Amino acid sequence: MTTSEPTPLLAVSQLNAAYDGSQILRDVTITLPERQLVALMGRNGVGKTTALKCIVGLVKPTSGDISLNGIPLNEMPSEERARAGIGYVPQGRDIFPNLTVWENLKISLVVHGTKANGQVDRVLELFPVLKEMLGRKGGVLSGGQQQQLAIARALVSNPKVLVLDEPTEGIQPSIIDEIVETLQRLRARSGLTMILVEQNLDFIAALSQRILIIQKGTITREVAPGELADASLVGEFVGIVT
């Protein structure tokens, strides 16, 4: 008698996507079990961000399936996917610059139809610097503080899967270290599942359990975090010189 495999928390199967007739993703398949962090790596323009946008509902794939806890997402608009449990931190942060930190966090509850139940307070415990800046407008925060706000805003809805696109872009190393520590603590405490696109090798090595290499819209290889020390592998498949 065989034991069936558990249903993955997030499943992407044979995903294809195109822009203006140009094929971007080709049969991308990603299986993300609960409590795991998967990183997507590859050269610029190979489809990494497109894959994330398909998952969160900002890009409609030409074919393939996406499911969360076995529930099909293909026909769900992005706001329903967010309510179903997908939190998204886009590249460039995309916070509301004219709203205060507090308003940025509270508006996430409204958009996701979520009751507070102390969730904002719990998230602020993870980001104490934001707790000191609740009355400041998002636009006056530093790049690192804005990124922390963007992550906090996504976490307020208590997502099942956190999707992060280039979370270290344009951020000073000390803030990157703080974000790593926060996400490690969060994963240990609540078992949060994450999928991210990132170029910072130290960030990926510190957080990920699996790394998927994308080339020309196709996942061609899976590597372990320890393999990021191989400069030839990183240079050939990812385009980063270490």
Image (tube, helix red, strand yellow):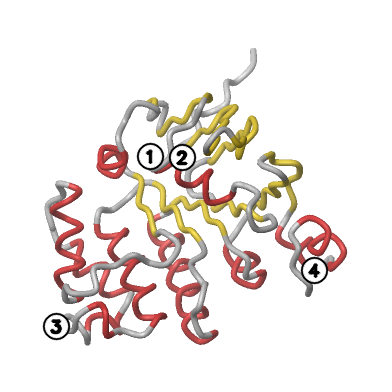
Q: Disc 4 to disc 2, how far (Cα)? A: 30 Å
> Residue at point 45% right, 62% down?
91
Circle 4: is it few (<14), some (14-19), or many (20+) Cα within 10 Å?
few
Please tell me which of labels 3 and 4 falls first in the chain. Answer: 3
Circle 1: is it few (<14), some (14-19), or many (20+) Cα within 10 Å?
many
Residue found at the far top of this picture: 1
Circle 3: is it few (<14), some (14-19), or many (20+) Cα within 10 Å?
few
Residue 17 in the image: state x and y as whole percent.
54, 34
Say whether marks 3 and 2 touch (CB < 8 Å).
no
> Residue at point 65% right, 33% down?
26
Q: Which is in the foreground here, disc 4 or disc 1? A: 1
Using the image, determine if residue 116 lies above or below residue 201. above
Q: Which mark is residue 73?
A: none
Using the image, determine if residue 155 lies above or below residue 134. above
Using the image, determine if residue 47 lies above or below residue 92. above
Which residue does the numbered mark 2 point to in the structure image?
A: 54
Which residue does the numbered mark 1 point to in the structure image?
A: 57
Q: Which is in the foreground here, disc 3 or disc 4? A: 3
Residue type marked 1: Gly
Please tell me which of labels 4 and 2 falls first in the chain. Answer: 2
Using the image, determine if residue 87 lies above or below residue 142. above
Q: Disc 1 to disc 3, how far (Cα)? A: 32 Å
Frontmost residue, 165 versus 43: 43
Residue type marked 2: Cys
Which residue does the numbered mark 4 point to in the structure image?
A: 229
> Residue at point 56% right, 31% down?
15
Q: Which mark is residue 135?
A: 3
